């Protein structure tokens, strides 16, 4: 025990007593001598108010405002400040029912007794005005300005997307952006892909409040305040009028239209039908409307333009012909006499329709002759210089994929699909190593395993229109960065495997399709329109009507792809719809005599809901 | 068989402990009080849990007092090992859930292993250092003792729990009392002083001041026979200090902004710390006599993030004023000072060493917690369990129980 130095405990005791002495002195200073802090706290307290930033605005390519913010108010409650209030009156003003009132109040008391709790979200400015007039009757309640998005053109839901309150998973995922629950975040469309520009930064304001929570002014001359920074504005590539027209044309039909400016890759319109008014996903009804859309049997939330996968059908013949020309399998004067069927024993391959013989590649396209393109495809694959089928197909595959197929194009929207062009490995696995050009012959006319999105289809024709290249299709042109609009840079330019010299005859052929061929009903006076119809077989019912084209023939300004599901041949729906889109964009109006076509397209109804069907069955005697 | 008799208990300490436990419980209730608060015993809330803890620790104390003391002392290393394993578990689980958490969530309550490890380490140290053949002067024995401290200390540092880690540093005082050289303590204070001064004044001024002071000392010693030795010592000290000073300055600039702010606020160099300002306002508003029980407004909910834990002292200051603070601080220093009153009460060396270890733990909690509330110690995150409220149910009790 000798080594338990008794006197050394004085050190620790000294430390404790010394610290105690310092604490007591400091407390004496704070609590008895110093008047400064007392004055601050006597009847005042400091409250931190969150100042929400205005989200960036969105414009179309012509400067039309297509998304803006509308002021609304969240009603907050601080339960410990509540006095007796006239509950029915408050419910009436805020347009809520008493059950909602009771459940929210329970929640508020449980979760946030002293701090403001969001009691009712997104109250209209009219209700808020009434509320504010009688604020003195509703002690403990207050209003906080918020904004919701408004879409004055009521269209473009799939492109523009929507915003909603950030959830805890997203808060964790985007730690660097410092989200707080209650903040808005882009959930879809460009609201999501350009979230970091649109969101802006929250501000904070410290205010002095008295015991009744009335604001007494800013704390410490605003020294600790932080102004909110509004989000950056976007200029999109959309032509909102064209977008609106596209949506009206596809009304009551399932399908999609994509319009791109070929030389720049700027998307002029991106329509997916059925669609909905984006305004229904803002404000208090968002939740209900969203679940209704989610349950809809025709899936309006699904963006068919970038997610729908379709067989390109005859529209693929253009790419097929270009590949054959480049590989030297045919020349432009290659002719094939169509007897109405294609002679492979054991396969019953028929041409779809009767037409004059195809004396060259232009006529082959004009009449969309299947046997012509079967032969073209076989000539390509069976070229002696390739040696074996694997190498031959690999070469064809690389040519075709260079059109931007079988890959995500990198559009600035979430959830783009990549489509499908089958690989050599796929066929090796499927047929062993013994397969021939006749085994995979349906690829030659865009059927079989080939799947493309409407965006890819349109993009591939942009490449044709550009005679050998395309630029990543995109939706946003410029971003406002601190008052200055900056163009989106570093857009990738992709060069096709088919050189410049091969395109002119094909483009001539495409012009002929509209002038004399399968799309002749969609001719537009004064516009040199080039395009190709398609009738995509699908196993689930009637064929899809497809059309892709561009105009004018020289220096094309617009390329349009249109797919209307279960609508029959390409000339029936897709071609006239596309021609109207092109006419609207180039002439800024539809000619009077073509108004009939416009009306017929808008009025035709190809969607039949199950419940409507049941009704019509009942009505029949 | 040695069983404590009633008369051997340190009743003063027990009385102070229970007084503080009750004050703590009532204060927690007041801090979380609202118009529709349930009863003080509702164990769904912090204050109810606090009550449950007081009961449990009281019960534990009675058990410990009546159990054969060997049962506790012989298993000291086992308890220590368990506490280290728990720290390891919490380190790996905590990394999965959230980098900074230092507890295991058991649903009803959150187990914070660093709390257990504090007194388990004290017990293990006491057991080791009270062995007859062990002496601090022996380098190997000293190294073992330091290792016992370092293991949990390092694990807790890995959890970024600065407050709790400091507790382990305080065991230096225990080693000191057992014979560790005075120079270690002096060096410790010297480093602390240099660190604080460096942050207040520019490093270069700091060095210059030292040069002047040292020159003065050397001048006065110039006639000494061992002058050369002294000269060498001060030269090394100066160079060492210079390197240290610049590295402190360097690391301080690497700290997160809020950490810098907290330290700057404490040093009176401005900066912005909402918590410190708010706790001053709350304390200040209590004035001499306080606003009365349940009448505090500043310390409730709105302003301070950890009103029921880290900043609980604000509630005392606001509701009971300067007088209340005084009567809480008094027994708080009373317990550590009184429980180690000279000799008599604790007979075995083990219980003396353990008791002193507990005093070390207690001191750090006292200084950090109240210090940060009144604004003389920088705010430390993660000192979750509260001095006043918790009073470490397990700390003083074993110390009494060992008074046989």
Image (cartoon, helix red, strand yellow):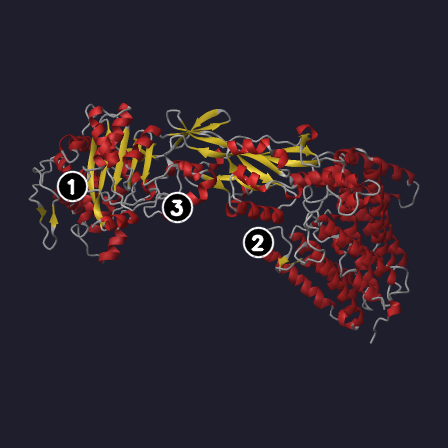
Task: Give the label on residue B113, or none.
Answer: none
Which quarter of the figure is the N terminus of chain A placed in? Answer: bottom right
Q: Is residue B332 left or right of residue A408?
A: right
Q: Nearer the viewer, residue B149 or A617?
A: A617
Which circle, 2 or 3, is nearer the viewer? Answer: 3
Q: Earlier in the sequence, mark 3 or mark 1?
A: 3
The span from disc 3 to disc 1 (Cα, nearest Å) is: 53 Å
The residue singled out by tag 2 in the image is B97
The residue singled out by tag 1 in the image is A329
Count all numbered tags in the image, as a single digit: 3
Q: Is residue B271 left or right of residue A292?
A: right
The span from disc 2 to disc 3 (Cα, nearest Å) is: 36 Å
**Chain letter behind tag 3:** A
Whether residue A278 is situated above or below residue B346 in the rendered picture: above
**Chain letter behind tag 1:** A
In the rendered image, residue A68, in percent from the top left (x then y), is placed at 45, 30
Crowding near the residue tagged with mark 3, few <14, some 14–19, many ≥20 C-alpha atoms within 10 Å: few
The span from disc 1 to disc 2 (Cα, nearest Å) is: 63 Å
Whether residue A535 is situated above or below residue A512 in the rendered picture: below
Q: Are marks 3 and 1 in contact (CB under 8 Å)?
A: no
In the rendered image, residue A386, in percent from the top left (x then y), is placed at 19, 47
**Chain letter behind tag 2:** B
Task: Give the label on residue A292, or none.
Answer: 3
Whether residue A352 is situated above or below residue A577 in the rendered picture: below
Q: Are marks 2 and 3 in contact (CB under 8 Å)?
A: no
Q: Are marks 1 and 2 in contact (CB under 8 Å)?
A: no
**Dot 1: what SS?**
loop
**Dot 3: what SS?**
helix
Q: Residue at x 64, y 31 (%)?
A: A225
Q: Nearer the viewer, residue A454 or A85?
A: A85
Which circle, 1 or 2, is nearer the viewer? Answer: 2
Which circle, 3 or 1, is nearer the viewer? Answer: 3
């Amino acid at each position: 025990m000798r080594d338990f130095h008794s006197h050394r405990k004085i050190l620790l005791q000294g430390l404790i007593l010394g610290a105690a002495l310092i604490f007591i002195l400091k407390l004496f200073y704070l609590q008895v001598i110093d008047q400064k802090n007392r004055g601050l706290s006597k009847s005042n307290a400091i409250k931190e108010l969150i100042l929400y930033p205005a989200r960036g605005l969105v414009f179309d390519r012509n400067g039309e405002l297509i998304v803006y913010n509308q002021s609304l108010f969240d009603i907050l409650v601080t339960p410990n400040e509540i006095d007796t209030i006239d509950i029915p009156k408050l419910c009436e003003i805020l347009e809520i029912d008493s059950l909602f009132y009771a459940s929210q109040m329970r929640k508020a008391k449980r979760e946030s007794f002293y701090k403001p709790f969001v009691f009712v979200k997104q109250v209209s400015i009219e209700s808020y005005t009434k509320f504010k007039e009688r604020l003195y009757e509703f002690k403990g309640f207050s209003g906080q300005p918020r904004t919701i998005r408004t879409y004055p053109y009521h269209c473009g839901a799939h492109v523009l997307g929507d915003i909603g309150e950030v959830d805890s998973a997203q808060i964790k995922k985007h730690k660097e952006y410092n989200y707080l629950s209650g903040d808005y975040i882009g959930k879809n469309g460009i609201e999501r892909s350009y979230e970091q520009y649109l969101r802006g930064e929250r501000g904070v304001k410290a205010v002095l409040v008295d015991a009744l929570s009335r604001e007494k002014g800013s704390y410490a001359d605003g020294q600790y305040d932080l102004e909110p920074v509004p989000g950056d504005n976007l200029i999109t590539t959309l032509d909102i009028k064209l977008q609106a027209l596209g949506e009206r044309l596809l009304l009551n039909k399932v399908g999609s239209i994509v319009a791109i400016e070929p030389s720049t890759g700027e998307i002029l319109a991106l329509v997916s039908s059925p669609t909905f008014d984006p305004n229904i996903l803002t404000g208090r009804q968002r939740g209900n409307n969203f679940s209704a859309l989610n349950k809809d049997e025709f899936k309006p939330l699904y963006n068919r333009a970038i997610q729908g996968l379709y067989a390109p059908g005859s529209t693929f013949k253009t790419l097929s012909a270009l590949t054959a020309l480049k590989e030297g399998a045919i020349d432009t004067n290659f002719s094939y006499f169509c007897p109405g069927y294609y002679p492979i024993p054991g396969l019953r391959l028929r041409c779809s329709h009767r037409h004059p013989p195809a004396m060259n590649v232009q006529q082959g396209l004009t009449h969309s002759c299947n046997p012509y393109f079967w032969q073209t495809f076989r000539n390509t694959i069976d070229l002696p210089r390739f040696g074996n089928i694997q190498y031959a197909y690999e070469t064809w595959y690389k040519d075709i994929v260079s059109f931007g197929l079988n890959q995500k194009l990198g559009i600035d929207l979430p959830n783009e699909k990549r489509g499908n062009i089958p690989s050599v490995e796929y066929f090796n696995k499927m047929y062993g190593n013994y397969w021939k050009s006749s085994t995979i012959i349906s690829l030659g006319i865009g059927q079989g395993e080939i799947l493309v999105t409407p965006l890819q289809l349109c993009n591939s024709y942009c490449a044709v229109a550009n005679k050998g290249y395309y630029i990543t299709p995109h939706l946003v042109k410029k971003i406002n960065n601190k008052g200055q609009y900056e163009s989106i840079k570093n857009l990738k330019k992709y060069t096709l495997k088919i050189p410049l010299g091969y395109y002119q005859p094909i483009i001539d052929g495409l012009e002929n399709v509209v002038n004399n061929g399968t799309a002749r009903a969609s001719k537009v006076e004064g516009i040199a329109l080039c395009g190709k119809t398609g009738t995509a077989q699908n196993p689930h019912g009637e064929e899809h009507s497809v059309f892709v084209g561009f105009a004018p023939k020289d220096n094309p300004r617009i390329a349009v792809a249109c797919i209307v599901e279960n609508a029959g041949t390409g000339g029936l729906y897709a071609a006239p719809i596309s021609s109207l889109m092109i006419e609207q964009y180039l002439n800024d109006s539809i000619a009077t005599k073509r108004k009939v076509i416009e009306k017929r397209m808008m009025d035709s109804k190809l969607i039949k809901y199950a419940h409507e069907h049941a009704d019509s069955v009942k009505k029949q005697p | 068989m040695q069983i404590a008799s009633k008369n051997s208990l340190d009743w003063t300490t027990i009385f102070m402990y229970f007084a503080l436990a009750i004050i703590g419980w009532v204060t927690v209730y007041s801090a979380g009080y609202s118009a529709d608060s349930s009863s003080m015993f509702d164990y769904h809330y912090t204050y109810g849990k606090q009550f449950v803890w007081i009961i449990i620790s009281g019960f534990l104390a009675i058990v410990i007092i009546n159990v054969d003391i060997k049962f506790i002392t012989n298993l000291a290393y086992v308890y220590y090992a368990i506490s280290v394993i728990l720290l390891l578990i919490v380190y790996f689980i905590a990394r999965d859930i959230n980098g900074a958490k230092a507890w295991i969530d058991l649903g009803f309550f959150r187990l914070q292993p660093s709390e257990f490890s504090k007194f388990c380490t004290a017990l293990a140290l006491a057991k080791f250092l009270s062995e007859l053949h062990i002496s601090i002067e022996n380098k190997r024995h000293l190294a073992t003792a330091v290792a016992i401290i370092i293991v949990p200390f390092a694990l807790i540092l890995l959890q970024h729990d600065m407050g709790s880690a400091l507790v382990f540093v305080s065991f230096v005082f225990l080693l000191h009392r057992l014979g560790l050289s005075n120079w270690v303590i002096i060096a410790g204070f010297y480093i602390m002083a240099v660190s604080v001064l460096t942050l207040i004044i520019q490093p270069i001024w700091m060095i210059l001041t030292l040069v002047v002071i040292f020159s003065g000392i050397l001048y006065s010693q110039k006639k000494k026979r061992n002058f050369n030795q002294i000269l060498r010592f001060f030269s090394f000290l100066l160079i060492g200090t210079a390197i240290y000073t610049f590295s402190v300055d360097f690391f301080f600039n690497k700290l997160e902004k809020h950490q810098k702010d907290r330290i700057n606020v404490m040093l009176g160099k401005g900066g912005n710390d909402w918590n410190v300002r708010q706790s001053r306002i709350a304390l200040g508003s209590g004035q001499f006599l306080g606003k009365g029980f349940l009448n505090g407004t500043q310390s409730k909910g709105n302003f301070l993030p950890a009103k029921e834990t880290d900043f609980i002292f604000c509630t005392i200051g606001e509701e009971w004023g300067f007088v209340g603070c005084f009567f809480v601080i008094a027994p708080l220093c009373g317990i550590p000072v009184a429980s180690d009153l000279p000799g008599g009460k604790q007979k075995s060396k083990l219980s003396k060493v353990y008791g002193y270890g507990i005093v070390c733990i207690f001191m750090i909690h006292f200084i950090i917690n109240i210090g940060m509330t009144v604004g003389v110690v920088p705010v430390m995150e993660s000192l979750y369990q509260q001095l006043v409220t918790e009073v470490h149910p397990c700390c003083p009790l074993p110390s009494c129980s060992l008074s046989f």
